[in-house]
Image (cartoon, grey):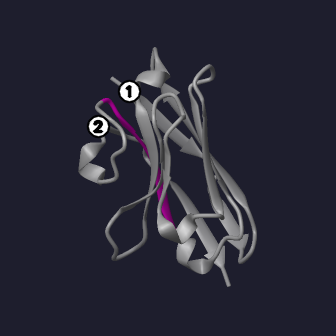
Amino acid sequence: QVHLVESGGGLVQTGGSLRLSCAASVRTMNKYGMGWFRQAPGKAGELVAGSSGDGGNIIYADPVKGRFTVSRDNTKNLLSLQMNSLKPIDTALYYCAARVSSWPASLPTAFDYWGQGTQVTVSS
């Protein structure tokens, strides 16, 4: 069983930055592809960014390319998402998710474990 706990969300003004963290309770984190998803009210969840188990294969959604950076530290069982130049459209509940099978993957149904989420609100 994998337990994921997100932190770092909050309220920020347009153009500001936030750093999200996901602590994973796993024995060997590099066995898991991991991703950050977000879901805004009334919208479907979408993958924001993701990383293969060894961090060598990174994917980003087009709306966040150049603004968000995903990273992982397998020695600390930690996945991070640095979000810069935030916009009101980035407002959403952000989730950390883990996948046991092959990478890459982008659909929510492809991920096996989920955190509870952390709220990000960007004011205009």
Q: Give the class, few, some or many, for how many residues have Cα within 10 Å of label 2's Cα (few <14, many ≥20).
A: some
Amino acid carrying label 1: it is Val
Picture coordinates of residue 2, whole percent (x, y): 38, 27
Q: Find disc 1 in the rendering and name its residue.
A: 2
Tell which tag, 1 or 2, sits nearer the viewer: 2
Q: Which mark is residue 61?
A: none
Residue situated in front as seen by the camera: 32 or 58: 58
Q: In the drawing, does residue 15 fall left or right of residue 89?
A: right
Residue 123, quarter of the rendered image: bottom right
At 36% from the left and 38% from the top, the residue drawn is 103
Q: In the drawing, does residue 78 fall left or right of residue 96?
A: right
Q: Which mark is residue 112?
A: 2
State yes or no: discs 1 and 2 in contact (Cβ < 8 Å).
yes
Residue situated in front as seen by the camera: 113 or 46: 46
**Residue at disc 2, secondary structure:** loop
Residue 41 seen by the camera: yes
Picture coordinates of residue 64, whole percent (x, y): 56, 66
Q: Residue 32, relative to residue 38: is it above or below?
A: above
Q: Quadrant of the N terminus?
A: top left
Looking at marks 1 and 2 on the same chain, the residue that comes earlier in the sequence is marked by 1
Q: Residue 55, relative to residue 110: is it above or below?
A: above
What residue span does the magenta drawing correspond to? 92-100
Amino acid carrying label 2: it is Asp
Residue 91 seen by the camera: no
Identify the residue at the far front of this view.
56
Q: Give the class, few, some or many, for how many residues have Cα within 10 Å of label 1's Cα (few <14, many ≥20).
A: some
At 66% from the left and 64% from the top, the residue drawn is 67
